[in-house]
Amino acid sequence: MDVYTNADDVAGYGANVTFDPDVLEVDDIVGEDFGDPVVNVNNEEGWVYFTQSQATGEDAPTRFAQIEFNVLEATETDIEFVPDETSINDGSVPPEDIQIDAHSGTTLEFDDEPTEDVLSLVAGEQDGDSIGVELETNADDVAGYGAEVTFDPEIVAVEEVVGVDFGDPVVNVDNDEGTVFFTQSQATGEDAPTLAEIQFEVLETGETDIEFVADETSVNNGSVPPEDIPVDLEGTSISVEADDEPTDDVLSLIAGEQDGDAIGVTIETNADDVAGYGAEVTFDPEIVAVDEVVGVDFGDPVVNVDNDEGTVFFTQSQATGIDAPTVAEIQFEVLETGETDLEFDAEETSVNDGSVPPEDIPVDLEGTSISVEADDEPTDDVLSLIAGEQDGDAIGVELETTVENAAGYQAKLTFDPEIVAVDEVVGVDFGDPVVNVDNDEGTVFFTQSQATGEDAPTLAEIQFEVLTTGESDLKFVAEETSVNDESSNVPVDLEGTSIGVERVSDSDGISLPPPTVSGEAVFSVDSVDLSTTTATVGEPVEIHVELSNVGDGDGVHKLAVETGVESIATEYVTLSSGESTTV
């Protein structure tokens, strides 16, 4: 497929083209009117970026390059430019961008070559908790095969794969992921063989598709060397029914009434001769947290709590069994108003009797759901971030509050460090704050206080430098943000904001180069040389920096001279992978 333009005096270009990676993959890109381009391909995500330039311009029509695709699937697919990452420039010095009025993609359609041979999965009848699926083909002179088959691992599991007309295959099973690969070959070919049978164990009542993975499935003939036989792949679907043994015994979670910011949930069973148990229970960690687990008819259990993930495991046993005990109670702390399901993890939950050695008691597991209400104190006061208008490559965001008699504050904010960087934080109605900035991680902490309070003050203003065009959320870190009056902390709601910014220019007013599309640039400052170590007012100081790009992609690096939080000189340096320069 050719890439071309009708523009005149074209001396360079860069283009990002997208395609469906299930249908096509890029094999090569070669230059036509230009030399072979620099190329970065991602066939997994379906895009390719390529670029080239020359000293003199070409007039229309200019054919930049030809993309050579491999066809993976016979269907229709669109091939499109990414407009923001596609540009052409003229032959002037320095080169200037040529406006592109339209980015015209294309649509390709491919047809399958017909084949009469088929490799099929044929399901048999369920027998108890087993069901067989045969691998068959109508192809002639079949001497070998390899097949990868997928299935729903919650419905069935592979027990074994046995040969039928061929010997038993080499097998690789992953019942957790729901895949099985098996392969076998022989010296002479057979016509229309049944190659193998997959024996599945039925785990749950339901339906599952049994499908081939096309890239990992093939059939070959008996020639020397063997040749692939083109085959269509036909999967199947099976409906199965689990042969569960009924049980009358139940292990249940029973919720009590909420008491303030606490609610209890008991673990009860109607089973007889219960001498031990282990239970793992899941919950929503944003709604509740485990405070403790205490024994009821049993002693206090051994407990393992993960309130971050929302799980609690607890276990206890004793020498003699009890009939229908309440084994324990989970005490939850209410964090937020809402509802959460409380469920057993079946694989980690069991009940045993008092025999020696103890035997498991089959039980059905019954979870529960609790609705809770947090006892929050209402507040009318707010601490807000208010964004101003962008001015060049700077934008200010004010920190305001509705609190009356505000005498102090501290605030920690997060931002996207690829979009903006903190230049300085200045006081407005308060003095300049103490500031701690981490522009690499995208955080800034600042704090200030005074002897007397003010009503509804604008506390400070954060001056951000715009690094690149985009949008960044500005959010408070609640645990490190507070407002106080002259005597105590004042509860406030926290309201962040979002800013959309546009990078205008670098420090010399020159348009910035487009962002790196591929690879990853890694910059290393190799040396810094100062003309003097003592600065005198009114006299210049020269700083020479040796900078290298040791990464595997091109990129832009910001060099800045700062005093405290004030930036007094900034320069942007563009380096290719492996390139070094002295600035």
Image: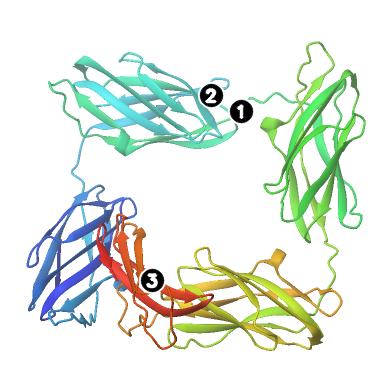
Name the element at disc 1.
Answer: loop
Residue 104 relative to residue 11: left or right:
right
Q: Nearer the viewer, mark 1 or mark 3?
A: 3
Q: Position of residue 283 (x, y in %)?
A: 73, 47
**Point 92% across, 30% down: residue:** 297
**Residue at point 63%, 25% (across, down):** 243
| Amino acid type, callout 3 | Leu
- Secondary element under disc 3, as helix, strand or loop, is strand
Q: Name the residue nearer the viewer: 357 or 9.
A: 9
Q: Is residue 483 left or right of residue 176?
A: right
Q: Classify residue 301 as left or right of residue 138.
A: right
Q: Which mark is residue 172?
A: none
Which residue does the numbered mark 3 point to in the structure image?
A: 559
Q: Which residue is mark 1?
A: 242
Residue assigned mark 2: 201
| Tags 2 and 3 touching, CB below 8 Å | no
For label 2, the SS is: strand
Residue type highlighted by circle 1:
Ala
Q: Nearer the viewer, residue 338 or 415?
A: 415
Find residue 165 and report its image quarter.
top left
Circles 2, 1 touching at the beta carbon (< 8 Å) = no
Three-letter amino acid code at disc 2?
Glu
Quadrant in the picture for residue 225: top left
